[in-house]
Amino acid sequence: MHIKGALATALSLAFLSVPAAAQETPQRAQITMGNGAANAIQVEGVTRQKADTVASSVRVDGADVSTLRANSTRLTFPEVTIEKPGWLVLHPVIDGRPDGDIVSGFTYLDAGQNADVAIRIQHPAGAGDKFLVMLHSDVDQDRVFDFVFVEDGINVEDTAVFEGTRMIAHLISLPE
């Protein structure tokens, strides 16, 4: 099963609770979300800080100066453990469902325990806004987050981290 399909299945299972009809064929293992034995995201104690992003540039062709100001939000997770180098990634929840096609923020993680892991969201995010936070592995170990879906069945290169059928992910509401 490719990752986009696995992510969609996991997210659907997380939000929909429909009784399964009795079947004669064995059921496929259900994908769940949470922490694993070797990979974990501590979501208790997450903090949110508002920040301003400022970028300036001077044009050589004249005396024009460009300045961009944007509101952003920084989230800090107390601790994230990942077995192999990878990424902590945020996907927004839109219309009550996580949208795995949109990345709101990401940050690189070294293998092992990482303390005070910060992710910058390049837009305002208020208290109560919901996100899916999850781990992705750095498959090609280039420290570049490769997140491109291709329609012909090729999956995202830096795949979601699973332990068995458990996707290392949590739904969170941003704190005050």
Image: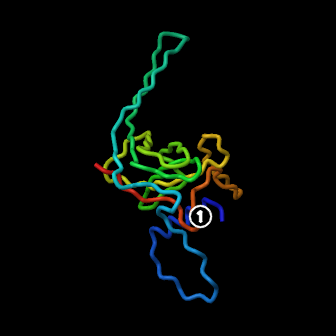
Horizontal placement of 130 versus 60: left or right?
left
Counting labels gives 1
- The outermost residue toward the top is 62
Colour approach in the figure: rainbow
Q: Name the residue under label 1.
A: 6
Residue occupying image coordinates x 52% and y 57%: 39
Where, by quadrant of the figure, is residue 54 drawn? top left
Q: How crowded is mark 1: few (under 14 residues within 10 Å), some or many (20 or more)?
A: some
Q: What element carries label 1?
A: helix
| Residue closest to the eye, 86 or 69 | 86
Residue occupying image coordinates x 49% and y 52%: 81
Image coords of residue 147 (percent x, y):
60, 48
| Residue closest to the eye, 8 or 90 | 90
Residue occupying image coordinates x 53% and y 53%: 135
Q: In this view, does 65 lie above or below 82?
A: above
- Amino acid tagged 1: Ala
| Residue closest to the eye, 151 or 163 | 163
Image coords of residue 110 (percent x, y):
54, 44
Horizontal placement of 89 versus 45: left or right?
right
Q: Is residue 2 above or below residue 115?
A: below
Image coords of residue 76 (percent x, y):
39, 45
Where, by quadrant of the figure, is residue 115 drawn? top left
Quarter of the image containing the N terminus? bottom right
Where, by quadrant of the figure, is residue 28 drawn? bottom right
Image coords of residue 114 (percent x, y):
47, 46
- The outermost residue toward the left is 176
Q: Is residue 15 above or below residue 62?
A: below
